[in-house]
């Protein structure tokens, strides 16, 4: 394994991104950072998320300062730095070349499930809130720049085959798999963003990856166009995912 490993895990909202952060944080050689561009995103977009003002006041909002931090020395004298990122925090015009200095991975979830989950908490007015388009833009950028496709993980595969998928991910990014990644103590973490009190109830109650359960609810008509556009981006990334030996009969 390399002396230091910076992992940028890119996803969208209402994924299992916080559970993945728990998984890596439970490794003794790893420190984690929770959505470091969130305050910058809130400041620039002026979107009214819960705790917006408090998040901006208590977090770094300068893009260059954030990038310098994320590509610098790993905190806490650890060997691995797991950075949880939301792809929609990459706003138009932002320089994404810094991502070439870290190991990038992509975490996706079927848009029907994302939309049903997200809408319970916050109104969906644009596909830009869900991150699918931004994930594809970053994926294609990295593929072009490096000549390789970054690892893609589907949340359903992780929930159904956590040991196998995490083992394969670790192998791809050049670190050893640890059994500690499969379970963790319940509760909050100091590393959780202050927004966790609003968004993280499920992961706070969890002690590991919960088996995937099919959602049979129907999408509202008003969100069907956003769903269809999101699905087109999701399908492109899904083709590149790390596959379990036993394939699901059908995706979504």
Image (cartoon, rainbow, N blue to C red):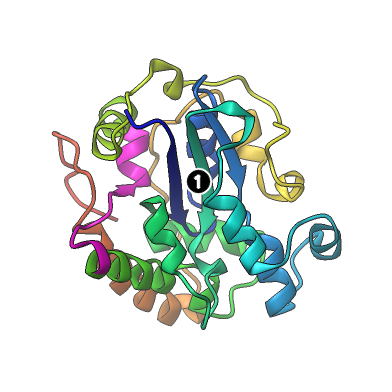
- Depicted 202 relative to depicted 217: above or below: above
Residue for badge 1: 17
Q: Position of residue 118 (x, y in %)?
A: 57, 60
**Residue shown at the point (61%, 35%) measured from the top left:** 75
- Please give the name of the residue rendered at 77% of the width and 47% of the height, measured from the top-left corner: 194
In this rendering, the answer to whether 166 lies above or below 124 is above
Magenta residues span 145-160
Of 92 and 71, the residue lying toward us: 71
The residue sitting at the top extreme is 179
**Which quadrant is home to the C terminus?**
bottom left
Classed neighbour count for the residue bearing mark 1: other residues with Cα under 10 Å, few (<14), some (14–19), many (≥20): many
| Number of on-image labels | 1
Q: Quadrant of the N terminus?
A: top left
Counting from the top left corner in percent of width and height, residue 53 is at 85, 65
Residue 122 among magenta residues: no
Residue 47 seen in render: no
Question: Hey, which quadrant is residue 48 in on the image?
Answer: bottom right
Residue 198 in view, yes or no: yes
């Amino acid at each position: 394994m390399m002396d230091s490993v910076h992992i940028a895990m890119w996803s969208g909202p209402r994924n299992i991104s916080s559970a993945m952060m728990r998984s890596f944080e439970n490794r003794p050689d790893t420190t984690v950072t929770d959505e470091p561009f969130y305050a910058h995103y809130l400041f620039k977009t002026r979107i009214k998320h819960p705790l917006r003002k408090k998040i901006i006041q208590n977090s770094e909002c300068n893009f260059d300062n954030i990038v310098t931090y994320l590509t610098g020395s790993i905190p806490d004298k650890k060997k691995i730095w797991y950075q949880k990122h939301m792809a929609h925090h990459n706003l138009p015009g932002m320089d994404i070349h810094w991502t070439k200095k870290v190991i990038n991975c992509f975490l996706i979830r079927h848009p029907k499930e994302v939309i049903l989950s997200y809408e319970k908490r916050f109104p969906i007015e644009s596909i830009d809130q869900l991150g699918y388009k931004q994930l594809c833009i970053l994926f294609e950028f990295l593929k072009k720049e490096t000549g390789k496709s970054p690892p893609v993980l589907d949340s359903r595969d992780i929930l159904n085959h956590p040991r196998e998928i995490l083992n394969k991910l670790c192998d791809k990014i050049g670190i050893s798999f640890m059994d500690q990644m499969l379970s963790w103590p319940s509760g909050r973490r100091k590393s959780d963003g202050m927004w966790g009190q609003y968004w993280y109830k499920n992961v706070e109650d969890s002690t590991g990856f919960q088996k995937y359960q099919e959602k049979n609810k129907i999408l509202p008509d008003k969100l069907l166009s956003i769903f269809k556009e999101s699905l087109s981006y999701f399908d492109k990334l899904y083709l590149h995912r790390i596959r379990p030996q036993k394939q699901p009969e059908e995706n979504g």
